[in-house]
Image (spheres, rainbow, N blue to C red):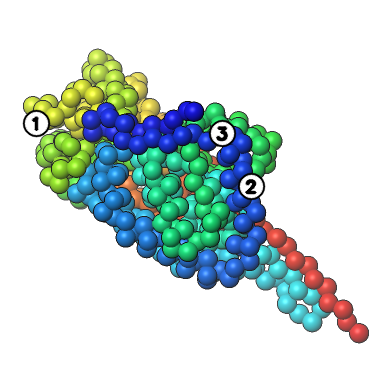
Protein backbone atom coordinates (compact mmCIF):
# COMPACT_ATOMS: atom_id res chain seq x y z
CA UNK A 1 0.00 0.00 0.00
CA UNK A 2 1.35 3.43 -0.97
CA UNK A 3 1.56 5.89 1.90
CA UNK A 4 1.29 9.65 1.40
CA UNK A 5 3.64 11.36 3.84
CA UNK A 6 3.85 14.94 5.07
CA UNK A 7 7.44 15.82 5.94
CA UNK A 8 7.53 18.63 8.50
CA UNK A 9 9.80 21.54 7.54
CA UNK A 10 10.54 22.08 11.23
CA UNK A 11 12.79 19.03 11.59
CA UNK A 12 12.28 16.91 8.45
CA UNK A 13 10.39 14.26 10.40
CA UNK A 14 7.27 12.49 9.08
CA UNK A 15 4.50 14.52 10.70
CA UNK A 16 1.52 12.71 9.18
CA UNK A 17 0.83 9.91 6.74
CA UNK A 18 -2.24 8.38 5.18
CA UNK A 19 -2.73 5.45 2.77
CA UNK A 20 -3.32 6.54 -0.80
CA UNK A 21 -6.73 5.49 -2.09
CA UNK A 22 -7.03 3.23 -5.10
CA UNK A 23 -8.85 4.45 -8.18
CA UNK A 24 -11.68 2.08 -7.35
CA UNK A 25 -12.05 3.37 -3.78
CA UNK A 26 -11.87 6.99 -4.93
CA UNK A 27 -14.48 6.34 -7.63
CA UNK A 28 -16.78 4.85 -5.02
CA UNK A 29 -16.39 7.96 -2.85
CA UNK A 30 -17.29 10.18 -5.81
CA UNK A 31 -20.27 7.96 -6.59
CA UNK A 32 -21.54 8.45 -3.04
CA UNK A 33 -21.17 12.20 -3.45
CA UNK A 34 -23.09 11.99 -6.73
CA UNK A 35 -25.89 10.04 -5.06
CA UNK A 36 -26.11 12.58 -2.22
CA UNK A 37 -26.16 15.64 -4.48
CA UNK A 38 -29.80 15.76 -5.55
CA UNK A 39 -31.15 15.55 -2.02
CA UNK A 40 -28.68 18.21 -0.88
CA UNK A 41 -29.69 20.53 -3.73
CA UNK A 42 -33.38 20.10 -2.85
CA UNK A 43 -32.80 21.52 0.61
CA UNK A 44 -33.74 25.19 0.91
CA UNK A 45 -30.89 27.52 0.04
CA UNK A 46 -30.90 29.19 3.45
CA UNK A 47 -30.61 25.80 5.14
CA UNK A 48 -27.55 24.94 3.04
CA UNK A 49 -26.01 28.33 3.77
CA UNK A 50 -26.51 27.97 7.51
CA UNK A 51 -25.07 24.46 7.57
CA UNK A 52 -21.95 25.70 5.79
CA UNK A 53 -21.60 28.54 8.28
CA UNK A 54 -22.00 26.04 11.13
CA UNK A 55 -19.16 24.05 9.58
CA UNK A 56 -17.03 27.18 9.48
CA UNK A 57 -17.86 27.89 13.13
CA UNK A 58 -16.97 24.32 14.11
CA UNK A 59 -13.58 24.67 12.43
CA UNK A 60 -13.01 27.88 14.40
CA UNK A 61 -13.57 25.87 17.57
CA UNK A 62 -10.64 23.64 16.55
CA UNK A 63 -8.09 26.47 16.50
CA UNK A 64 -5.99 25.00 19.30
CA UNK A 65 -5.38 21.99 17.07
CA UNK A 66 -5.40 23.69 13.67
CA UNK A 67 -2.79 26.40 14.32
CA UNK A 68 0.07 24.17 15.55
CA UNK A 69 -0.90 21.56 12.98
CA UNK A 70 -0.29 24.13 10.22
CA UNK A 71 3.06 25.07 11.79
CA UNK A 72 4.12 21.43 11.75
CA UNK A 73 2.93 20.81 8.19
CA UNK A 74 3.97 23.94 6.31
CA UNK A 75 5.92 26.12 8.70
CA UNK A 76 3.72 29.16 9.38
CA UNK A 77 4.45 30.63 12.83
CA UNK A 78 1.78 30.00 15.45
CA UNK A 79 1.85 33.70 16.43
CA UNK A 80 -0.24 34.47 13.33
CA UNK A 81 -3.13 32.29 14.49
CA UNK A 82 -3.76 30.30 11.34
CA UNK A 83 -6.00 31.55 8.54
CA UNK A 84 -9.21 32.25 10.37
CA UNK A 85 -9.56 35.93 9.51
CA UNK A 86 -9.65 35.36 5.74
CA UNK A 87 -11.40 32.00 6.09
CA UNK A 88 -14.27 33.57 8.03
CA UNK A 89 -14.43 36.74 5.94
CA UNK A 90 -14.80 34.80 2.70
CA UNK A 91 -17.34 32.35 4.11
CA UNK A 92 -19.48 35.10 5.61
CA UNK A 93 -19.41 37.19 2.45
CA UNK A 94 -20.47 34.43 0.07
CA UNK A 95 -23.21 33.52 2.54
CA UNK A 96 -24.46 37.11 2.47
CA UNK A 97 -24.76 37.20 -1.33
CA UNK A 98 -25.88 33.63 -2.01
CA UNK A 99 -29.59 34.42 -2.33
CA UNK A 100 -29.06 37.30 -4.76
CA UNK A 101 -26.35 35.51 -6.72
CA UNK A 102 -28.52 32.44 -7.24
CA UNK A 103 -31.92 34.05 -7.75
CA UNK A 104 -33.64 33.51 -11.11
CA UNK A 105 -33.32 36.09 -13.85
CA UNK A 106 -36.97 36.75 -14.69
CA UNK A 107 -37.52 37.79 -18.31
CA UNK A 108 -41.30 37.69 -18.35
CA UNK A 109 -44.04 36.85 -15.93
CA UNK A 110 -47.35 37.56 -17.61
CA UNK A 111 -50.73 35.97 -18.19
CA UNK A 112 -49.32 34.34 -21.33
CA UNK A 113 -45.76 33.34 -20.44
CA UNK A 114 -43.24 32.70 -17.71
CA UNK A 115 -39.68 33.03 -19.00
CA UNK A 116 -36.72 32.90 -16.68
CA UNK A 117 -33.17 31.66 -16.26
CA UNK A 118 -32.41 29.74 -13.08
CA UNK A 119 -29.03 28.76 -11.65
CA UNK A 120 -28.67 25.02 -11.13
CA UNK A 121 -25.85 23.28 -9.27
CA UNK A 122 -23.12 21.82 -11.47
CA UNK A 123 -23.28 18.51 -9.58
CA UNK A 124 -20.07 17.14 -8.06
CA UNK A 125 -17.23 19.63 -7.61
CA UNK A 126 -13.62 18.46 -7.18
CA UNK A 127 -11.39 20.82 -5.20
CA UNK A 128 -7.64 20.20 -5.46
CA UNK A 129 -6.20 22.53 -2.85
CA UNK A 130 -2.65 23.85 -2.29
CA UNK A 131 -0.48 23.90 0.81
CA UNK A 132 0.44 27.60 1.08
CA UNK A 133 -2.94 28.82 2.42
CA UNK A 134 -4.65 25.45 2.69
CA UNK A 135 -7.84 26.61 4.43
CA UNK A 136 -8.42 29.95 2.71
CA UNK A 137 -7.79 28.67 -0.81
CA UNK A 138 -10.06 25.69 -0.25
CA UNK A 139 -12.95 27.68 1.23
CA UNK A 140 -12.99 29.94 -1.84
CA UNK A 141 -14.67 27.08 -3.70
CA UNK A 142 -15.96 24.79 -0.94
CA UNK A 143 -18.31 27.35 0.67
CA UNK A 144 -20.07 28.68 -2.46
CA UNK A 145 -20.13 25.23 -4.08
CA UNK A 146 -21.96 23.69 -1.12
CA UNK A 147 -24.25 26.68 -0.73
CA UNK A 148 -25.22 26.43 -4.41
CA UNK A 149 -26.27 22.79 -4.01
CA UNK A 150 -23.21 20.93 -5.23
CA UNK A 151 -21.51 18.15 -3.37
CA UNK A 152 -17.75 18.57 -2.94
CA UNK A 153 -14.84 16.16 -3.06
CA UNK A 154 -11.60 17.65 -1.70
CA UNK A 155 -8.04 16.45 -2.20
CA UNK A 156 -5.37 18.38 -0.38
CA UNK A 157 -1.68 18.80 -1.11
CA UNK A 158 0.65 16.30 0.54
CA UNK A 159 2.36 19.09 2.47
CA UNK A 160 -0.94 19.92 4.22
CA UNK A 161 -2.22 16.37 4.25
CA UNK A 162 -4.59 16.72 7.20
CA UNK A 163 -6.45 19.88 6.13
CA UNK A 164 -9.11 18.27 3.92
CA UNK A 165 -9.75 15.61 6.54
CA UNK A 166 -10.14 18.24 9.26
CA UNK A 167 -12.42 20.46 7.16
CA UNK A 168 -14.74 17.56 6.35
CA UNK A 169 -14.77 16.48 9.98
CA UNK A 170 -15.75 20.00 11.09
CA UNK A 171 -18.53 20.32 8.53
CA UNK A 172 -19.97 16.86 9.23
CA UNK A 173 -19.89 17.48 12.99
CA UNK A 174 -21.78 20.71 12.30
CA UNK A 175 -24.56 18.84 10.50
CA UNK A 176 -23.57 18.68 6.82
CA UNK A 177 -24.79 15.23 5.72
CA UNK A 178 -22.38 12.38 5.05
CA UNK A 179 -21.15 12.23 1.44
CA UNK A 180 -22.04 15.88 0.73
CA UNK A 181 -18.47 16.91 1.57
CA UNK A 182 -15.88 14.18 1.12
CA UNK A 183 -12.10 14.05 1.62
CA UNK A 184 -9.84 11.78 -0.45
CA UNK A 185 -6.14 10.96 -0.20
CA UNK A 186 -4.70 10.48 -3.69
CA UNK A 187 -1.35 10.38 -5.42
CA UNK A 188 -0.90 12.38 -8.61
CA UNK A 189 -1.42 9.47 -11.01
CA UNK A 190 -4.68 8.40 -9.36
CA UNK A 191 -5.89 12.01 -9.26
CA UNK A 192 -5.42 12.28 -13.03
CA UNK A 193 -7.04 8.91 -13.62
CA UNK A 194 -10.03 9.86 -11.47
CA UNK A 195 -10.51 13.11 -13.38
CA UNK A 196 -10.29 11.25 -16.68
CA UNK A 197 -13.23 9.04 -15.71
CA UNK A 198 -15.51 12.05 -16.21
CA UNK A 199 -17.12 11.75 -12.79
CA UNK A 200 -16.82 15.47 -11.96
CA UNK A 201 -18.87 18.38 -13.23
CA UNK A 202 -16.44 21.06 -12.15
CA UNK A 203 -12.80 20.97 -11.06
CA UNK A 204 -10.98 23.72 -9.19
CA UNK A 205 -7.19 23.47 -8.96
CA UNK A 206 -4.72 25.83 -7.30
CA UNK A 207 -1.07 25.05 -7.87
CA UNK A 208 1.74 25.16 -10.38
CA UNK A 209 1.46 25.84 -14.10
CA UNK A 210 2.60 22.32 -14.87
CA UNK A 211 0.04 20.98 -12.42
CA UNK A 212 -2.65 22.97 -14.25
CA UNK A 213 -1.57 21.50 -17.54
CA UNK A 214 -1.83 18.02 -16.05
CA UNK A 215 -5.36 18.76 -14.89
CA UNK A 216 -6.34 20.03 -18.34
CA UNK A 217 -4.89 16.94 -20.02
CA UNK A 218 -6.69 14.63 -17.58
CA UNK A 219 -10.01 16.44 -18.05
CA UNK A 220 -9.78 16.58 -21.85
CA UNK A 221 -12.96 15.23 -23.39
CA UNK A 222 -14.88 15.06 -20.10
CA UNK A 223 -16.34 18.55 -20.65
CA UNK A 224 -15.97 19.32 -16.95
CA UNK A 225 -15.67 22.99 -16.12
CA UNK A 226 -12.23 24.07 -14.94
CA UNK A 227 -11.06 26.79 -12.59
CA UNK A 228 -7.26 27.06 -12.54
CA UNK A 229 -5.17 29.40 -10.38
CA UNK A 230 -1.57 28.73 -11.27
CA UNK A 231 1.73 30.63 -11.12
CA UNK A 232 2.37 34.27 -10.39
CA UNK A 233 5.05 36.96 -10.43
CA UNK A 234 3.04 39.87 -9.08
CA UNK A 235 4.52 43.36 -9.60
CA UNK A 236 4.26 46.64 -7.73
CA UNK A 237 4.90 50.12 -9.07
CA UNK A 238 5.77 52.88 -6.59
CA UNK A 239 5.22 56.29 -8.21
CA UNK A 240 6.85 59.56 -7.25
CA UNK A 241 3.78 60.73 -5.29
CA UNK A 242 3.42 57.55 -3.24
CA UNK A 243 3.21 57.42 0.54
CA UNK A 244 6.68 55.94 0.93
CA UNK A 245 6.36 54.48 4.43
CA UNK A 246 2.98 52.89 3.66
CA UNK A 247 4.36 51.42 0.44
CA UNK A 248 7.39 49.93 2.20
CA UNK A 249 5.30 48.47 5.01
CA UNK A 250 2.68 46.87 2.76
CA UNK A 251 4.98 45.70 -0.03
CA UNK A 252 7.63 44.18 2.23
CA UNK A 253 4.91 42.34 4.12
CA UNK A 254 3.43 41.25 0.80
CA UNK A 255 6.83 40.01 -0.37
CA UNK A 256 7.88 38.08 2.73
CA UNK A 257 4.86 37.10 4.86
CA UNK A 258 4.32 33.33 5.05
CA UNK A 259 7.96 33.06 3.90
CA UNK A 260 6.88 34.60 0.60
CA UNK A 261 4.65 31.63 -0.16
CA UNK A 262 1.61 33.64 -1.23
CA UNK A 263 -0.29 33.28 -4.50
CA UNK A 264 -0.53 37.07 -4.79
CA UNK A 265 2.69 37.88 -2.95
CA UNK A 266 4.81 40.73 -4.31
CA UNK A 267 7.76 39.34 -6.28
CA UNK A 268 9.09 42.38 -8.17
CA UNK A 269 8.95 46.10 -7.42
CA UNK A 270 9.50 49.05 -9.77
CA UNK A 271 10.20 52.34 -7.99
CA UNK A 272 10.35 55.83 -9.47
CA UNK A 273 13.92 57.10 -9.44
CA UNK A 274 13.06 59.97 -7.07
CA UNK A 275 12.08 57.51 -4.30
CA UNK A 276 14.30 54.58 -5.20
CA UNK A 277 17.18 55.02 -2.73
CA UNK A 278 14.89 55.76 0.21
CA UNK A 279 12.60 52.89 -0.69
CA UNK A 280 15.47 50.39 -0.79
CA UNK A 281 16.96 51.66 2.48
CA UNK A 282 13.65 51.50 4.34
CA UNK A 283 12.80 48.10 2.86
CA UNK A 284 16.08 46.56 3.97
CA UNK A 285 15.53 47.89 7.49
CA UNK A 286 11.96 46.52 7.51
CA UNK A 287 12.93 43.02 6.37
CA UNK A 288 15.95 42.87 8.68
CA UNK A 289 13.64 42.91 11.71
CA UNK A 290 12.28 39.41 11.10
CA UNK A 291 13.02 36.67 13.60
CA UNK A 292 13.61 33.43 11.70
CA UNK A 293 13.05 30.27 13.69
CA UNK A 294 10.87 27.39 14.83
CA UNK A 295 7.25 28.25 13.96
CA UNK A 296 6.05 26.73 17.25
CA UNK A 297 7.93 29.49 19.14
CA UNK A 298 5.55 32.46 19.72
CA UNK A 299 8.48 34.85 19.20
CA UNK A 300 9.17 33.59 15.68
CA UNK A 301 7.95 35.91 12.93
CA UNK A 302 9.35 33.99 9.92
CA UNK A 303 9.18 30.22 9.83
CA UNK A 304 10.83 27.71 7.52
CA UNK A 305 9.66 27.31 3.98
CA UNK A 306 7.24 24.45 3.54
CA UNK A 307 9.83 22.13 1.99
CA UNK A 308 13.59 22.07 1.51
CA UNK A 309 13.23 21.94 -2.25
CA UNK A 310 11.21 25.17 -2.26
CA UNK A 311 13.97 26.94 -0.33
CA UNK A 312 16.59 25.45 -2.66
CA UNK A 313 14.77 26.96 -5.64
CA UNK A 314 14.87 30.44 -4.06
CA UNK A 315 18.57 30.12 -3.22
CA UNK A 316 19.32 29.01 -6.78
CA UNK A 317 17.45 32.00 -8.24
CA UNK A 318 19.27 34.43 -5.96
CA UNK A 319 22.67 32.91 -6.69
CA UNK A 320 22.05 33.07 -10.44
CA UNK A 321 20.99 36.71 -10.19
CA UNK A 322 24.07 37.61 -8.14
CA UNK A 323 26.27 35.87 -10.70
CA UNK A 324 24.76 38.23 -13.29
CA UNK A 325 25.47 41.32 -11.21
CA UNK A 326 22.58 41.59 -8.73
CA UNK A 327 23.33 42.94 -5.26
CA UNK A 328 21.93 41.48 -2.04
CA UNK A 329 21.19 43.88 0.83
CA UNK A 330 20.08 41.91 3.89
CA UNK A 331 22.99 40.88 6.14
CA UNK A 332 23.21 37.09 6.64
CA UNK A 333 24.69 37.68 10.09
CA UNK A 334 21.23 38.78 11.22
CA UNK A 335 19.86 35.34 10.40
CA UNK A 336 22.13 32.62 11.81
CA UNK A 337 19.09 30.30 11.83
CA UNK A 338 19.33 29.98 8.01
CA UNK A 339 20.45 26.36 7.81
CA UNK A 340 20.83 26.02 4.06
CA UNK A 341 17.72 23.83 4.01
CA UNK A 342 14.12 24.77 4.84
CA UNK A 343 15.02 27.72 7.09
CA UNK A 344 15.67 30.57 4.68
CA UNK A 345 16.47 34.21 5.51
CA UNK A 346 14.63 37.01 3.68
CA UNK A 347 16.49 38.92 0.98
CA UNK A 348 16.23 42.06 -1.14
CA UNK A 349 18.03 42.35 -4.46
CA UNK A 350 18.88 45.40 -6.55
CA UNK A 351 20.84 45.75 -9.80
CA UNK A 352 18.36 43.24 -11.18
CA UNK A 353 16.83 43.10 -14.65
CA UNK A 354 14.57 40.91 -16.72
CA UNK A 355 17.41 38.82 -18.10
CA UNK A 356 17.40 37.13 -14.68
CA UNK A 357 15.11 34.24 -13.74
CA UNK A 358 14.66 35.98 -10.38
CA UNK A 359 12.70 38.76 -12.10
CA UNK A 360 10.84 36.61 -14.63
CA UNK A 361 10.05 33.23 -13.09
CA UNK A 362 8.05 32.53 -9.97
CA UNK A 363 10.16 32.63 -6.80
CA UNK A 364 7.55 31.86 -4.12
CA UNK A 365 9.92 32.70 -1.30
CA UNK A 366 10.90 35.59 1.02
CA UNK A 367 12.96 37.45 -1.57
CA UNK A 368 12.12 40.37 -3.84
CA UNK A 369 13.86 42.38 -6.53
CA UNK A 370 13.66 46.19 -6.79
CA UNK A 371 14.28 48.12 -10.01
CA UNK A 372 14.51 51.86 -10.66
CA UNK A 373 12.22 53.36 -13.34
CA UNK A 374 11.76 56.85 -14.79
CA UNK A 375 8.30 56.81 -16.37
CA UNK A 376 4.89 55.16 -16.24
CA UNK A 377 5.48 53.68 -19.67
CA UNK A 378 8.72 52.05 -18.54
CA UNK A 379 7.05 50.61 -15.45
CA UNK A 380 4.08 49.38 -17.48
CA UNK A 381 6.29 47.59 -19.98
CA UNK A 382 8.15 45.85 -17.18
CA UNK A 383 4.99 44.87 -15.33
CA UNK A 384 3.60 43.29 -18.50
CA UNK A 385 6.87 41.51 -19.28
CA UNK A 386 5.73 38.30 -17.62
CA UNK A 387 3.97 35.08 -18.51
CA UNK A 388 1.80 35.52 -15.42
CA UNK A 389 -0.98 37.89 -14.38
CA UNK A 390 -2.74 37.58 -11.02
CA UNK A 391 -2.45 40.98 -9.28
CA UNK A 392 -0.58 44.26 -9.70
CA UNK A 393 -0.08 46.88 -6.99
CA UNK A 394 0.06 50.60 -7.82
CA UNK A 395 1.20 53.25 -5.33
CA UNK A 396 0.05 56.81 -5.99
CA UNK A 397 -2.21 59.55 -4.66
CA UNK A 398 -3.97 59.76 -8.03
CA UNK A 399 -6.83 57.26 -8.59
CA UNK A 400 -7.32 58.44 -12.18
CA UNK A 401 -3.68 57.72 -12.96
CA UNK A 402 -3.92 54.32 -11.28
CA UNK A 403 -7.03 53.52 -13.30
CA UNK A 404 -5.39 54.57 -16.54
CA UNK A 405 -2.30 52.45 -15.89
CA UNK A 406 -4.38 49.61 -14.48
CA UNK A 407 -6.37 49.29 -17.68
CA UNK A 408 -3.12 48.60 -19.53
CA UNK A 409 -1.76 45.99 -17.11
CA UNK A 410 -2.27 42.34 -18.07
CA UNK A 411 -3.55 41.09 -14.74
CA UNK A 412 -6.60 39.76 -12.92
CA UNK A 413 -6.72 42.37 -10.14
CA UNK A 414 -5.41 45.94 -9.91
CA UNK A 415 -4.68 47.29 -6.43
CA UNK A 416 -4.02 50.90 -5.51
CA UNK A 417 -2.18 51.48 -2.23
CA UNK A 418 -2.57 47.92 -1.05
CA UNK A 419 -1.39 44.45 -2.04
CA UNK A 420 -1.55 40.75 -1.21
CA UNK A 421 -5.24 40.72 -0.34
CA UNK A 422 -8.22 38.80 -1.63
CA UNK A 423 -11.47 40.78 -1.58
CA UNK A 424 -14.33 38.25 -1.52
CA UNK A 425 -16.68 40.74 -3.18
CA UNK A 426 -14.46 40.83 -6.26
CA UNK A 427 -13.71 38.02 -8.66
CA UNK A 428 -10.42 36.25 -7.95
CA UNK A 429 -9.04 35.53 -11.38
CA UNK A 430 -5.89 35.61 -13.49
CA UNK A 431 -4.67 35.85 -17.06
CA UNK A 432 -1.96 34.24 -19.17
CA UNK A 433 -0.24 31.34 -17.38
CA UNK A 434 -1.82 32.29 -14.08
CA UNK A 435 -4.83 30.35 -15.29
CA UNK A 436 -8.50 30.79 -16.04
CA UNK A 437 -11.89 30.99 -14.41
CA UNK A 438 -12.75 32.93 -11.29
CA UNK A 439 -13.77 32.30 -7.71
CA UNK A 440 -15.71 34.26 -5.06
CA UNK A 441 -18.03 37.21 -5.78
CA UNK A 442 -21.23 36.71 -7.78
CA UNK A 443 -19.11 35.37 -10.62
CA UNK A 444 -17.83 32.57 -8.42
CA UNK A 445 -21.40 31.39 -7.86
CA UNK A 446 -22.03 31.57 -11.61
CA UNK A 447 -19.04 29.35 -12.31
CA UNK A 448 -20.22 26.77 -9.78
CA UNK A 449 -23.70 26.62 -11.31
CA UNK A 450 -25.11 26.35 -14.80
CA UNK A 451 -27.95 28.34 -16.35
CA UNK A 452 -31.22 26.55 -16.97
CA UNK A 453 -33.87 28.29 -19.05
CA UNK A 454 -37.62 27.99 -18.52
CA UNK A 455 -40.01 28.99 -21.30
CA UNK A 456 -43.51 28.28 -20.02
CA UNK A 457 -46.45 29.06 -22.25
CA UNK A 458 -49.68 29.24 -20.29
CA UNK A 459 -52.91 27.73 -21.57
CA UNK A 460 -55.39 30.47 -22.36
CA UNK A 461 -59.10 30.08 -23.07
Of the numbered discs in the image, which one, if any, rests on residue 334?
A: 1
Residue 18 in the image, given as x and y percentages of width and height:
42, 36
Q: Where is residue 137 in the image (x, y as percent from the top left)?
A: 41, 47
Question: What is the secondary structure assignment of the residue under circle 1?
Answer: helix
Q: Earlier in the sequence, mark 1 or mark 3?
A: 3
Q: Are marks 1 and 3 in contact (CB under 8 Å)?
A: no
Q: Which of the 4 image quadrants contains residue 379?
A: top left
Give the residue pinned by disc 2: 31
Q: Residue at image x 29%, y 55%?
A: 63
Q: Are marks 2 and 3 in contact (CB under 8 Å)?
A: no
- Of circles 1 and 2, which is in front? 2
Front residue of 282/460: it is: 460
Residue drawn at 17 percent across, 27 percent down: 338
* Mark nearer the N terminus (2 vs 3): 3
- Distance from label 1 to label 3 (Cα)? 48 Å
Q: Which residue lies furthest to the front in this view?
A: 1
The structure residue drawn at horizontal position 75% and vertical position 66%, both measured from the top left corner, is 454
User: Is residue 270 at least partly visible in the picture?
Assistant: no
Rendering coords of residue 406 (x, y %): 41, 47
Q: What element carries label 2?
A: helix
Sequence-wise, the earlier of marks 1 and 2 is: 2
Measure the C-alpha gap from mark 2 to mark 3: 14 Å
Residue behind mark 3: 22
For residue 116, above or below residue 64:
below
Q: Is residue 154 above or below residue 12?
A: below
Amino acid sequence: MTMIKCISPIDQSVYAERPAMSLEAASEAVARARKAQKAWARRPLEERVQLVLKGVARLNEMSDEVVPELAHMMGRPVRYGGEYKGFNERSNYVASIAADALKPLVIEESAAFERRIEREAQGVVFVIAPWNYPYMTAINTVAPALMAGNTVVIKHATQTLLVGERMVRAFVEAGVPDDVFVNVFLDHATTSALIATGKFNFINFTGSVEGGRSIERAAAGTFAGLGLELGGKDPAYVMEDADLDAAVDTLMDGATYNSGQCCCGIERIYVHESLYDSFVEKSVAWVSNYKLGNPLDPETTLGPMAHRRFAAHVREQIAAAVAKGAKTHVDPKLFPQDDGHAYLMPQILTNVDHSMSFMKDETFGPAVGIMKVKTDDEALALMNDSQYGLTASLWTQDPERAGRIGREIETGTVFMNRADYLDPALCWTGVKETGKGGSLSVIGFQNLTRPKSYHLKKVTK
